[in-house]
Amino acid sequence: MDQTVETMAQKAAPMSESEKNAIIGGVLLSMLLAALDQTIVAPALPTIALALGHAEYLPWIVTGYLLTATAMAPLYGRISDVYGRRSVIYAAIMIFLLGSLVSALAPNMLVLVIGRAIQGAGGGGLFALAQTVIGDLVPPRERARYSAWISGTWAVASVAGPLLGGVFAEHLHWSLIFWINLPIGFLAMALINNPLKKLPIAAKNHRIDGLGAALLVIATSLLLLALNWGGSAYPWLSGEILGLVACSAVFWAFFALRLLKTAEPLISLDVLGNPIVLAGTLSMFLLQAANIGASVYLPVYLQSIVGLSVSESGMAMLGLLLGTVAGATLSGRLIPRFVHYKRIAIIGVSLAIVCVGVLSAIAGRASLPEVLILTTLTGLGSGTTFPVATVSVQN
């Protein structure tokens, strides 16, 4: 009883603006850790393929991270309701650093993919908990303003990541893109230690849907294996590919059944049934698919078709990444001034579609300035959607 009263008193205790900013700054620093790791890897992918072989599995360096990050992100919010934000963020950072260590020491592509999957298990929590803490502290009308903080975090990662990744891969060693996470991670843990003590524990009783997360990872992995091997390692209609697709369908069915039957599923169908949440989720899913595809294959295109070196391709990636950050920052500042702020995202995505279409048409003969202009405008347009979707869903 006394503990309950104490918890309620902690929740009622007001925080000053400086205290809120300290907490938000601390969690965004931990978010920077995961954001930097996404942008630093892309320029080094061709070099990693040459060093470890099995270039056909190169997309799995990105996919392995995203699979576990996607499955784990919903779990972190519920776990942090029970055990507190601070301890769960600490656990996410430690898991991320363990994955970084495995990736840095990887002797082959398989171990590297496993290390990236471990990183994703921690990185998904860093992204989710940063958004959760901001949602805890900031009222709905002010969240667009704080989206600029998130955009600033991505700006730092967007500038430093490609440059460091290119330099490390070309002049030093590709493993440094993972070793660098260790000092940054320990610094983040030291800086967020005191600010996060000010956040009370929600003390909610939640059921953690670990089985749902496992089913999601297995179903998606089997499908991706079929898409990866089909037409290359095995014919599309071979028994191996059809068997993988069939097994994936079975696990997807189990996952759907789990969502329908369990009391607290990994993905809440009640929440997803809201038309605003559904539209925002689908738009972000499609936009992230396009952005990830561009970030993975653009360095390969720049090095093999345009003829840039590894470090030069890293610098050329800045147009896309900084354009995305600029679009998100601009959108976040404009949202409070618009009643129907979805128009910001519609105009931005239309610009991105036009630019991608032009780049696709001239890709075989495009000059470097043309590529930079088109990718920058693509990022600028697509970036406007992130704050619009986030604020709409949170509100």
Image: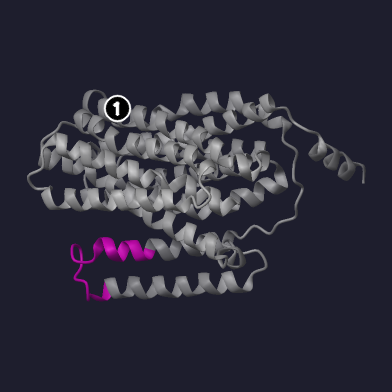
Q: Nearer the viewer, residue 268 or 169?
A: 268
Horizontal side, residue 312 vs residue 138: left or right: left
Picture residue at 51% right of the left edge, 32% below the top = 149
Check disc 1 and report the residue beneath it: 163
Q: Where residue 289 appears, x then y in whole percent? A: 35, 54
Horizontal side, residue 46 vs residue 109: left or right: left
Colour convention of the picture: one colour
Q: Is residue 98 above or below residue 243?
A: above
Picture residue at 43% right of the left edge, 34% below the top = 154
Q: Is residue 177 in view from this perspective?
A: yes
Q: Is residue 137 above or below residue 357?
A: above
The stretch in magenta equals: 222-240
Residue 238 lies in the magenta-colored region: yes
Residue type of the residue flagged with mark 1 = Leu
Q: Where residue 319 appears, x then y in whole percent? A: 27, 35
Residue 64 lies in the magenta-colored region: no
Q: Nearer the viewer, residue 299 or 72?
A: 299
**Residue at the left extreme, as displayed:** 365
